[in-house]
Amino acid sequence: MEVADDHTLVTDADHSSTGPACGERADSVRACVPTSTIAELICSGAMTTPRSQVWEFGEPGGRLPYVFPRLSALLNIDDPSSPDSDSAAAEWLTQGLQAVAPSAWLWIADNGIFPPSDDTCGPPDGYATAIFARMSGRPDAVVEMPSTADPDEWIKGNISERPLNMGVSVFRLDSQGMVAQDKSQSLRLDAVWDVALDGIAQPSPNLLVSTTLGDPSSPTPQDSAAEALLGLVRRTAMLASTSFGHVCDDAGYSGLTSLDEVLWRGGHRKSLAAARSVLRGYSWATVLPRELVDRLGGASALSDSDAFVSVDELRGGSVALQATERFSSYDEAAVLRVFRAVAPVLPPGTPRETIAGRAEGRKRSIVWEDAARFA
């Protein structure tokens, strides 16, 4: 999407690549790199499926009739209070599954935890679950929660020891009780403290979730899942100060925003470090820190604009902006309204699609213009 000189929309799918040069390491939140079969399954790249890939259902194999392009949420906690940061991480990890995939949560509560494996690992059409931590001082060792442990107690107990990251992965099982090879029905929650990529835990975590698990009772599972993700973001952001957050379907699972990927500014660490002075991105739902809210005229000015259906004040003066009532209604016109509303605090420069994004046919909710023109 582009904006012409007269500020009308212009569709243009041909954008050249920017970003790190070939062979250069892209800076991102480091995921755990375990060696066991289960941990490899947990930490597989299935959570970065391109937005353009939609799974077809109805064929043999025990797949379910409800699925949608992968949705993700990100919340950057930036709070000097360790207890408050820990509370936010615990809320994210312990309440995320129930909030985003209540059917899976109820099944697991009734039937227990079945660890994922390469073979049959649970009842047909059930769920496989893994909860794990990568502890400081042991960056290559993944500690998996015993199936007999209480998840809430285990998560909170390990958070108090300041891990490098903790995660919850849930996979829908097929009619044979196996994890589908493409792991297309899945949810992953993470709290990542190791943002410096140096094996040293940081004071505040980055919180991520990615899901294709929908509510089978909902006529619009994608909209329901997006609303649930936004609810999780809002509740968690009331527990600790935040510098950025979003709910979208066009970002990967690395801690980079979609705008980070197409407007390269030095990677995840630099984007995160500047989050209170430059907005990291914009999406259907976006969390802005107090500093950027003030520069845009305050929460009341954002509420009075035509870009958002809700502006919710959060802890520390941050706000959560919601562009449309339903995620499925977030069309090009809505994207343009949001872009214009937040342009004064966006980084300057013209976005350009990456080589990988073009090869994948990535569809991004991005205005392909220099925000400085509209500031």
Image (tube, rainbow, N blue to C red):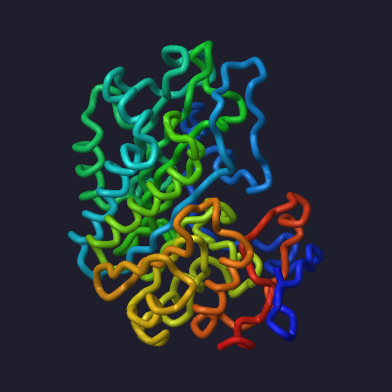
Question: Quadrant where the N terminus lies?
Answer: bottom right
- Residue closer to the observer: 36 or 13: 13
Q: Describe residue 260's horizontal placement relative to residue 139 as left or right.
A: right
**Is residue 367 shown above or below 126?**
below
Quadrant of res 49: top right
Q: Describe residue 57's horizontal placement relative to residue 29 as left or right.
A: right
Quadrant of res 237: bottom left
Question: Quadrant where the C terminus lies?
Answer: bottom right
**Is residue 224 shown above or below 107?**
below
The image shows residue 31 at horizontal and vertical percentages of 48, 48
**Is residue 193 shown above or below 151?**
below
Q: Describe residue 48's horizontal placement relative to residue 124 as left or right.
A: right
At x 52%, y 22%, the residue is 179
The image shows residue 79 at horizontal and vertical percentages of 27, 68
**Is residue 164 shown above or below 289?**
above
At x 45%, y 61%, the residue is 285
Q: Describe residue 211's horizontal placement relative to residue 242 as left or right.
A: right
Give the farthest residue toward the right.
14
At x 42%, y 15%, the residue is 122
Quadrant of res 329: bottom right
Q: How many marks?
A: 0
- Residue closer to the observer: 145 or 363: 363
At x 49%, y 40%, the residue is 220
The image shows residue 76 at horizontal and vertical percentages of 38, 63
